[in-house]
Amino acid sequence: MNEYNYKNLTLEELEKILVDADRSDIIKLLFIAIKNLDDINDRLKSLNRGAS
């Protein structure tokens, strides 16, 4: 799997990657997605603290 900036992928680009992906590629993408969700959650918590 080539190195991509996964945070800026369009759905079409992601689909092209997944068509050619093997199991290890999909696992890498899942870990990246989980990390991104953690980052988003941290940002939302920070915003909520600032709004209080």
Image: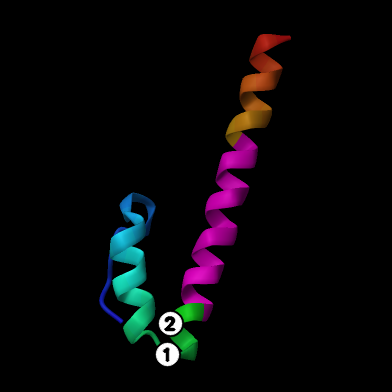
Where in the figure is residue 18, as x and y percent of width and height? 38, 77
State which quadrant residue 3 falls in. Answer: bottom left
Give the residue at x 57% y 41%. Answer: 40
* Foreground pick, 20 / 39: 20
Where in the figure is residue 24, as x and y percent of width and height? 47, 87
Give the residue at x 32% y 56%. Answer: 9
Q: Which quadrant of the figure contains the N terminus?
A: bottom left
Q: Which residue is the extreme one toward the top?
A: 52
Per the image, the residue denoted by label 2 is 25
Give the residue at x 35% y 81%. Answer: 19
Per the image, the residue denoted by label 1 is 22
Q: Residues within 10 Å of mark 1 (few under 14, many from 20)?
A: few
Q: Is residue 3 left or right of residue 49?
A: left
Mark 1 secondary-structure assignment: loop
| Cβ atoms at labels 1 and 2 below 8 Å apart | yes
Q: Is residue 45 above or below residue 34?
A: above
Q: Is residue 25 above or below residue 15?
A: below
Q: Amino acid at mark 2?
A: Asp
Q: Is residue 51 above or below residue 41?
A: above
Where in the figure is residue 23, as x and y percent of width and height? 49, 89
State which quadrant residue 48 falls in. Answer: top right
Q: Is residue 13 left or right of residue 41?
A: left
What residue range appears in magenta? 27-42
Q: Amino acid at mark 1?
A: Asp
